[in-house]
Image (cartoon, grey):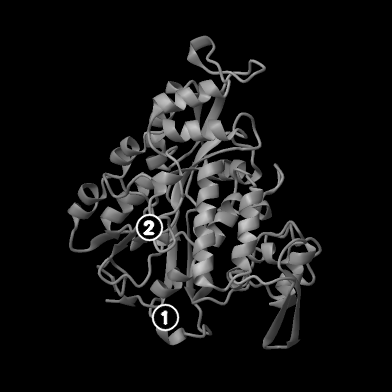
Amino acid sequence: MAYTFNLLKSNGGLQGAGGIAVAADGFVDSVSAPDAKTAVFKLKRVNTPGLIDIVSQNIVPEHVWKDIKDPVKETNENPVATGPFTKISNFQSQVYQIDKNPTYWQADKVKVKGIRIPWYSGNDAAQLAFVKGDLDWSSSFFPNVEQSVIAKNPTDLHYWWPTVGSVTLFMVNTTKKPFDDVKVRKAIGMALNRQQMITLILKGLTKPADVTGLSEGFAAVKVQDPAKLGDWTTYNPAKANALLDSAGYKKGAGGIRQTADGTPLKFTLTMVNGFTDWIAIGPVIQQNLKTIGIDAQIKTMDVPVAFDSWMKGTFDMSMFFGVDATSPYALYRNIMSKDTVKPVGTDTPLTVNHWRFASSKADDLLTKYATSSDPAKQKEIAQQLQTVFADEAPVIPMWAAPQLYNYNTKRFSGWASKDNPYAAAMSIQDVPAELLILTALKPK
């Protein structure tokens, strides 16, 4: 463990949750290993939620990585793993399989031989495979899931989409004008007809987000009435137009607004190939933005290209999954802290601050949160952070993102469910909840 964190510390281009902890302005001063079973972290300052950054970091073996000349460019084609499934028994372009790890520390709990993971071109192909019974566990979005999927085999096919995780976001690149203007971001927030989009793609399985950017998972710390903090997530194109008028973005040819130097507000709206839910609402977003004088040209990109544009900060505007976090501290740090801002062209982690926004007010509050161990004080600070988010609109909340958890009970038992909610894990996430499910499944 000590080797991994020191590797992160000396190679700033490496990705990982622990990178924030050991960065030059991070909270970890040094990491050492006095013996084979102990790692000692010496902190620069108190950081009560910092343990999450430490335990979430994937550990690499020193005996392999010490001989790698450039760790940042290393592709790690033969990784050393320690989970319940580590033996790669098949690896092809369309499917790969990982079999049971016989030396896993809970080997007696692993009743499944292996995990076979096929590649699908998009949600439609995955839905067809799930209905046919070719998939046991899927995190693809299935439109009209009750009628188009479950009704075809209600005995075996099931879904549970709780809205306790992240909030789906509409992100605009704040390194580009006019998205650096909070009035523009708020006007876009008011222009988007969330309820229409939810009705179109989610059939009432969620509801529009508010100006805190928090899902139901943070109910314990959420302000009682988010509407008192602002209304820029409420559909109101007339107010959005008035806000842009007051900010000086005048309408020009074709009703498209312009910046002070005459540059039209014309941008690329990135959509991801195969993400049928987002693609379906693309024209709605386009029309919503046109109503307030913004010309959004939809461009559908393959997954690697779209993700690369997000991570390098070269996009204009796009939908985004949202930020999964275990605390309001982690959520708001990943959304609006200088600690998570990377220069354009330098990759951000896939779920962190692609819009590249930093708030000095938020950073001050995050420091206070991290140095407190009093839950009441942390709640008070979390609510102050909600006010900052509502005031500065770093990114635009859309709706609570359902955890897309679809499962087939024909071959395996032990699945988490609405009636047995021990975990809510999408099969595409690298999260501890996946381990809970994988060690609970049993062949029938």
Apparent side of residue 314 relative to residue 270 in the rendered image (left or right) = right
Query: Dot 1 lies on which element?
Result: loop
- Label annotation for residue 216: 2
Amino acid at circle 1: Val
Where is 140 relative to 252, above or below? below
- Label annotation for residue 402: none
Residue name at image x 51 percent, y 85 percent: 105
The residue at which mark 1 appears reads as: 110
Amino acid at circle 2: Glu
Residue 113 placement (x, y as % from top left): 41, 76
Residue name at image x 61 percent, y 59 percent: 366
Apparent side of residue 82 relative to residue 134 in the rendered image (left or right) = right
Q: Earlier in the sequence, mark 2 or mark 1?
A: 1
Residue 120 placement (x, y as % from top left): 42, 50
Residue name at image x 40 percent, y 27 percent: 237
Which residue occupies the extreme top position in the image? 253
